[in-house]
């Protein structure tokens, strides 16, 4: 039957047609006619928009990138449709490695596209880059507290304990002007004891916003907040031990804290003085310059804690210079009532002093800034050689602390003293009838006359006469002072009452003052200035 079907003429024609069509298809596939037509239909160009411009090679330590204009570009590429879809593989870069200073420059774009597509163009092909130089300024860090301590406790003032007094803030110059403060926050919530932590610092602008791009150095400090049941805050004073080399003088000091908080019972705190003293040893300083020393604070008796327990003292020393201050007037203090005192040597009643200190301190000293006085307290009529006490400004000292300055002073009775007799006491008068200050009559006939020693040309004759049955003993000179030979004794109906020195003379001697045998000298170790941070 199969043979009959094949031998049929119609079937044979159909088979021949099918074979012909297959042969035609095979021939056209070998010549790539159909694939070329299909490929041509898929190739084309496309524009990739909003490609972010990425800078590289930038020196971020010295400069800040203020702007890139425009910040995005469009890239045209050619390729097959599957490869022309938007993708992160398309890059637009700009090389900033050749920039050497602040300003605005135009730089070409560098494009990076997938390997399967062909770069055609970019719009724009050049961008403007603005560079601004970074600038640093110093700021004093501020520590604030957050929260409240436990019930019944109170917090003290936060204190930076690592000696950091200033930090450096680096920003573009245009933004540095907006800085308001550098601040750190330490939590004291529910605290019952001193809180000590390392506190991170932040920079705030004038609107109170954190400037996150600011670079702070150091970026953190160690701080503590005193916590206690009872506290008292006192100012800090400095005292000095040890000696500087003879060629140096103090030019200035800076202290990390100006107030100290003391913790303890109310009775112990009430017994404290008006300040806390920190002792600084100068013996470790060997040459001029600035050094930072640690001064430990002693815990006052009866108290529990002191904060801070030590302070950092930045001490500046300089090679001293010398200067002669002339025409410093000598003042007399302590002259008794009804007495007059005159300086007979030196005749100018002035003294010249050789002082030393830093050049700036010496330049500022004037004669009226120096106190030169002779104390006549307890002396009656006569001629005395008295040491001169020198009080200098804190900024300078005597070049020769051991120098001895003396003046010769003659004390006489006041010209307006009156009485039937010629005797005048230090604090009262006697009349010829022997009447006392209260007006009561005295009996007896006694006459006392002091005769000066003619061998002493400086001595002035002094005469005390009158009636009375008592004569007061001579008033001795103060320790370390000797009257001139022939000085007459003092006669008075009442004991001599020492005159109260003036307020200036009672003022505590400045740093470095040393008194010995009635002679006051001033050490070279005087403080120039003290600054608290």
Image (cartoon, grey):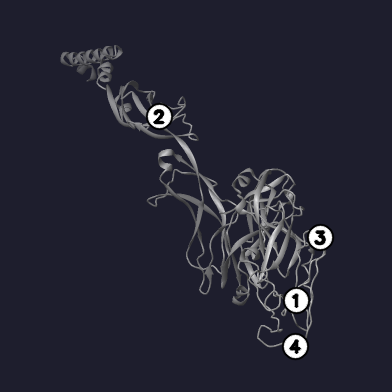
Mark 4, residues whose alpha carbon is within 10 Å: few (<14), some, or many (≥20)?
Answer: few
* Residue located beneath label 2 in the image: 103
| Of pointers 2 and 4, the one earlier in the residue sequence | 2
Residue that appears at 48% across and 34% down: 60
- Whether 139 is drawn above or below 429: the answer is above
Q: Nearer the viewer, residue 7 or 21?
A: 21
Numbered disc 3: secondary structure:
loop
* Other residues around mark 3 within 10 Å, as few (<14) / some (14–19) / many (≥20): few
Is 205 located above or below residue 149 in the figure? above
Residue at the image point whose x is 48% and y is 67% from the top = 148
Q: CA distance from mark 2 to mark 4?
A: 108 Å
The image position of residue 9, as x and y in percent, is 16, 13
Question: With 321 as the anchor, is 208 left or right in this view?
Answer: left
Distance CA(mark 3)–CA(mark 4): 36 Å
Which mark is first along the chain, 4 or 1? 4
Q: Secondary structure at mark 2?
A: strand
Find numbered disc 4 in the image and state the secondary structure of the residue it sits on.
loop
Comes first in the chain, label 3 or label 2: 2
* N-term-proximal mark, 3 vs 4: 4
- Which quadrant would residue 224 be assigned to in this image? bottom right
- Mark 1 or mark 2, whichever is nearer to me: 1
Are dots 1 and 3 in contact, CB under 8 Å? no
User: Disc 4 marks which residue?
Assistant: 443
Distance from the alpha carbon under mark 3 to that under mark 2: 89 Å
Give the residue at mark 3.
Answer: 456
Task: Give the mark, 1 or 3, whose residue is nearer the N terminus.
Answer: 3
Residue holding disc 1 = 465
Q: Nearer the viewer, residue 245 or 3?
A: 245
Q: Which comes before the other along the chain, label 1 or label 2?
A: 2
Tell which tag, 1 or 3, sits nearer the viewer: 1
**Is there CB contact under 8 Å for labels 3 and 4?**
no
């Amino acid at each position: 039957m199969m043979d009959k079907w094949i031998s049929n003429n119609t079937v044979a024609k159909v088979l021949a047609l099918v074979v012909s069509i297959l042969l035609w298809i095979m021939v056209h596939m070998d010549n790539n006619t159909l694939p070329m037509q299909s490929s041509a239909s898929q190739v084309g160009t496309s524009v990739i928009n909003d490609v972010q411009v990425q800078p590289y090679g930038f020196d971020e330590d010295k400069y800040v990138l203020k702007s890139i204009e425009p910040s995005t570009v469009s890239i045209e590429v050619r390729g097959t449709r599957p490869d022309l879809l938007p993708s992160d593989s398309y890059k637009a870069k700009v090389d900033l490695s050749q920039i050497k200073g602040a300003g605005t420059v135009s730089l070409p774009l560098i494009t990076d596209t997938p390997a399967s597509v062909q770069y055609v163009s970019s719009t724009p092909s050049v961008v403007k880059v603005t560079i601004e130089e970074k600038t640093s300024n110093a700021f004093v860090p501020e520590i604030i507290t957050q929260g409240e301590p436990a019930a019944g406790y109170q917090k003290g003032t936060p204190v930076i304990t690592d000696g950091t007094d200033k930090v450096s803030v680096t920003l573009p110059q245009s933004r540095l002007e907006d800085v308001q403060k550098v601040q750190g926050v330490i939590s004291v919530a529910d605290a019952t004891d001193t809180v000590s932590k390392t506190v991170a610092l932040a920079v705030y602008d004038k609107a109170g916003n954190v400037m996150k791009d600011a670079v702070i150095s150091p970026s953190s400090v160690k701080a503590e907040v005193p916590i206690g049941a009872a506290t008292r805050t006192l100012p800090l004073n400095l005292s000095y031990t040890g000696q500087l080399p003879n060629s140096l003088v103090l030019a200035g000091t800076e202290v990390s804290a100006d107030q100290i908080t003391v913790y303890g019972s109310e009775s112990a705190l009430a017994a404290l003085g008006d300040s806390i003293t920190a002792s600084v040893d100068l013996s470790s300083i060997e040459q001029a310059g600035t050094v930072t020393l640690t001064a430990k604070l002693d815990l006052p008796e009866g108290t529990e804690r002191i904060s801070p327990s030590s302070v950092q003292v930045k001490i500046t020393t300089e090679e001293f210079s010398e200067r002669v201050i002339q025409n410093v007037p000598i003042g007399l203090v302590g002259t008794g009532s009804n007495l007059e005192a005159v300086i007979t040597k030196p005749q100018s009643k002035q003294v010249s002093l050789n002082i030393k200190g830093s050049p700036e301190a010496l330049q500022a000293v004037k004669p009226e800034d120096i106190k030169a006085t002779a104390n006549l307290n307890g002396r009656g009529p006569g001629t005395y050689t008295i040491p001169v006490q020198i009080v200098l400004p804190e900024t300078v000292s005597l070049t020769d602390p051991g120098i001895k300055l003396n003046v010769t002073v003659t004390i006489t009775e006041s010209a307006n003293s009156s009485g039937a007799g010629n005797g005048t006491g230090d604090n009262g008068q006697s009349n010829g009838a022997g009447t006392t200050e209260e007006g009561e009559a005295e009996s007896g006939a006694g006459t006392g006359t002091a005769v000066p020693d003619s061998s002493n040309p400086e001595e002035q004759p002094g005469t005390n006469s009158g009636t009375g049955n008592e004569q007061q003993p001579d008033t001795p000179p103060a320790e370390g002072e000797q009257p001139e030979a022939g000085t007459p004794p003092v006669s008075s109906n009442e004991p001599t009452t020492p005159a109260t020195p003036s307020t200036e003379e009672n003022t505590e001697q400045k740093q470095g003052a040393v008194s010995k045998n009635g002679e006051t000298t001033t050490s070279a170790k005087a403080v120039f200035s003290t600054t608290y941070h």
